[in-house]
Amino acid sequence: MDQILFNLGLLAEYPVVNLKIIIDGVMIGALFALAAYGLALVWGVMNVKNLAQGDFVIAGGYVAWWGAQQGMHPLLGVPAAFILMWGLGWVVYKLLITRVIERDLFTSLLATFGLAIMMAQIMNLMFGSDTQSINLGYETLYFADGLIDVPIAKLIGVCMAAGLAAGVITFMKYSRMGQAIRATAQDSRAARVMGIDTEKVYAFTFSLNSAICGAAGAIIVMVWVIQPFYGITYSVRAFVIVTAAGLGNLPGVITAGLGIGAAEQYGSHIFGIGYQQAIAVILLLLVLVWRLSQQRKNRQVLK
């Protein structure tokens, strides 16, 4: 308790520390938002709650890490992970997801939970259980007499995440496939009547989600660490963001992603780094309780 009070006092005594925490939170929150946007696509278009979302992120990180071990420039790992994870997403859709789209919620949760376990075990067998990262060798920028440090690698990662997000948004807004995805999300039956091949839309959507997760993982391995069983942490964060923001609410996804990033950084500063993962779980429970209370308020009694 004394340590917690000391950490709180540090925030009050040195306001610049708050700025450092917010900057770190925004940097990691941008990557959370990227992975969550992919989940929002799959959830909104296909009504599939993908519990393996975080494992796709970790798999993308291993693609970039393995490429770096073979001599590929680390920054090229992002497009490489995007392309390879697109292919993996298409295979997973054809073999598994297509069988659960029209099924009940429990079936899709059970199927994707099994997929998450299988992916984690395969990555563990292939790459081992040690944490891995890519050292870009870039310098760190210091501000406020060294109290604020901003690694250039993280800045590059945030810029790449923002660029990818902008590209996906532009594609969804102006391309024919993007319009077909939005139409299918609104009403899949009406979309079929209008001549849209919803099966093709579903396959494209899940592949795009996998590719987005892969690119996010490739960025994460350059600024943090990955490990085969870290996927669940990113899955929980993605569910918190999408549940809080709502389906189809891109500004909400971005805001919630940045918010959970900042909340985790504050939590780790106040309570210790060991509680950082617990913050995401607590936030998920709070969001679920809040959503339930909102539904009860909006519920109308039938007469």
Image: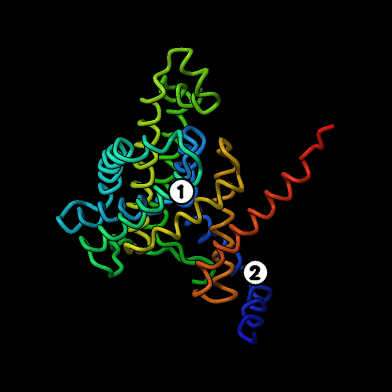
Residue shown at 50% from the left, 51% from the top: 238
**Above or below, 266 relative to 1:** above
Drawn side of residue 256 relative to residue 152, left or right: right
Callout 2: SS: helix
Name the spot of residue 7 as percent of width and height, x first: 62, 78
Furthest-right residue in this view: 303
> Which residue carries the number 2 mark?
15
Residue 272, horizontal then vertical, whole percent: 54, 76
Residue furthest to the bottom: 2
Which residue carries the number 1 mark? 109
Distance of mark 1 from mark 2, alpha carbons?
Answer: 44 Å
Frontmost residue, 34 versus 240: 240
N-terminal of the pair, mark 1 or mark 2, is 2
Which numbered circle lies on residue 132?
A: none
- Res. 34 visible in picture: no
Image coords of residue 182 (percent x, y) = 50, 26
Q: Is residue 135 left or right of residue 71?
A: right
- Where is the C terminus found, in terms of image quarters? top right
Residue at point 50%, 67% (across, down): 277
From this viewpoint, is residue 129 visible? yes
The image shows a total of numbered marks equal to: 2
Amino acid at the residue labelled 2: Pro
Q: Secondary structure at mark 1?
A: helix
What residue is rendered at 42% in x and 22% in y? 175
Which picture quadrant has residue 124? bottom left
Q: Amino acid at mark 1?
A: Leu
